[in-house]
Image (cartoon, rainbow, N blue to C red):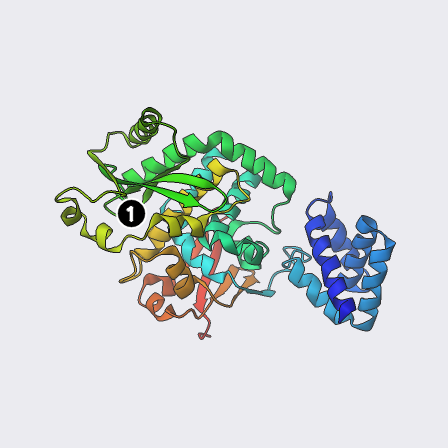
Amino acid sequence: SAQAHTGIDILLGLAGLFNSLPDAQDWLRQAAASPGGESSGLIALLEQAAGAEKAQLLRRLADQDPAWLERLARVLFGGSLASPAERVNMASASACAGLFLLLPAWIDLGLHELFENHAPTDRIAAVWRYWLALKCLGGQRLETNHRDPALLAAVGLEAPPGEADFNEAAAAAGALCLPLQRAFLQTLLSQGRADGRYLAAETCSLPGAGQVELLRDLRLDYWLDISAPVENAESRAERLAWVAAALGHSPEMVWESEVPPPAGLAERFPDYFQKAKPGLAELAYYHLPELPGEVDRLWSLLAQAALRCFARRLMGFAWSSAEHLHANFLHGAGSVLHTPQGLRVELPQAPLHTVLRLTSLREEAIEIPWVQGMAVQLVFRDEG
């Protein structure tokens, strides 16, 4: 047992090292094709990267139970040991299969086009989609989800982005935050999801990130802005003016949520005042502290819109919180199967999966435009 735990620790370290090694994936595939399979490939890579002593321990474990090490290798590397051709007809268990239910919302909101039109490279656009997926499933679940095979397949990656990819994507996003947000707000406006005339402003404290100011559209509660606290009324007015300019008109009213609403406002927007969830809990759901602050705030804006769009397709759940949607529709064991036609995604039997059966999502066939138009067939876990 102690040896096994030590072996797992070594392999976890190797998994982190894997993405930083030049051509490690191609090299490992070649090594895995030699006698001994994945176990041999792992040991050879570990010997090259970390020295013979650690490799020797894994070799002893492999001698005792080769199948154990091979299974563990596939778990740790999320199926990345297999080439695209080898993955055909290969099913992978997943805790993130429910993410595929959100992809129609991504497409409806034009988020893939937003990324493709602004990202300097296709690889950066894929990393941006990866961040969006992690946020949609809850930033606090990063460690659980970041290598999930369904999540990677959904965003068009074979393996989680390495440090260099992360840094390059973060730098590009930081330089383009304002153009990205402006284009996104114009999409919300053109689709009738927000009009920007009546807004709610709310100051929230995020653990480890200080205070932020959240600007919400009162009609359907799509978020328009998440900004770091401004120092004075003048700079706050400048930020609001920027949002107004992006929407093309100035708001008629900005209600400060810390004070009672003015007469008639609650009657005009009863859904918001009766059903909208406090901003603090919602922001905490999306928060990814690994991202730079400005990038984290903008991607939370995008993820919130994706879940709002998804929720509005569910009868009676349009104003549900992000955590409620995750727990009752997105969470659970599923699988993703690579087929010659595309992907077959077995959805989890979540607590309220019967609600999904009453929507078009039951028969939804999705084409993922960012993965060469890959076709995705969605099936429920208890269906053939």
For badge 1, the amino acid type reads Asp
Would you identify the image quadrant in which residue 37 lies?
bottom right
Q: Is residue 320 visible?
A: yes
- The answer to whether residue 120 of the structure is visible from this angle is no
**Front residue (pair 45, 261):** 261
Assess disc 1: are there few (<14), some (14-19) or many (≥20) residues with their C-alpha within 10 Å of its C-alpha: many
**Residue 152 place in picture, x, y as percent:** 56, 53
Q: Is residue 87 left or right of residue 3?
A: left
Q: Is residue 303 above or below residue 319?
A: above
Q: Position of residue 254 (x, y in %)?
A: 24, 36
Which quadrant of the structure image shows residue 5?
bottom right
Q: Residue at x 39, y 65 (%)?
A: 328
Side of 25 relative to 243 (left or right): right
In percent of width and height, residue 191 lies at 28, 42
* Residue visible at 28% across and 44% down in the picture: 193
Residue at mark 1: 221
Vertical relation: 264 (above or below) 80 = above
Dividing the image into 4 quarters, which one contains the N terminus? bottom right
Q: Nearer the viewer, residue 357 or 181?
A: 181
Front residue of this view, candidates 8 and 86: 8
Residue 321 at what x, y percent from top left?
35, 56
The residue sitting at 35% across, 48% down in the picture is: 279
Say which element carries label 1.
loop
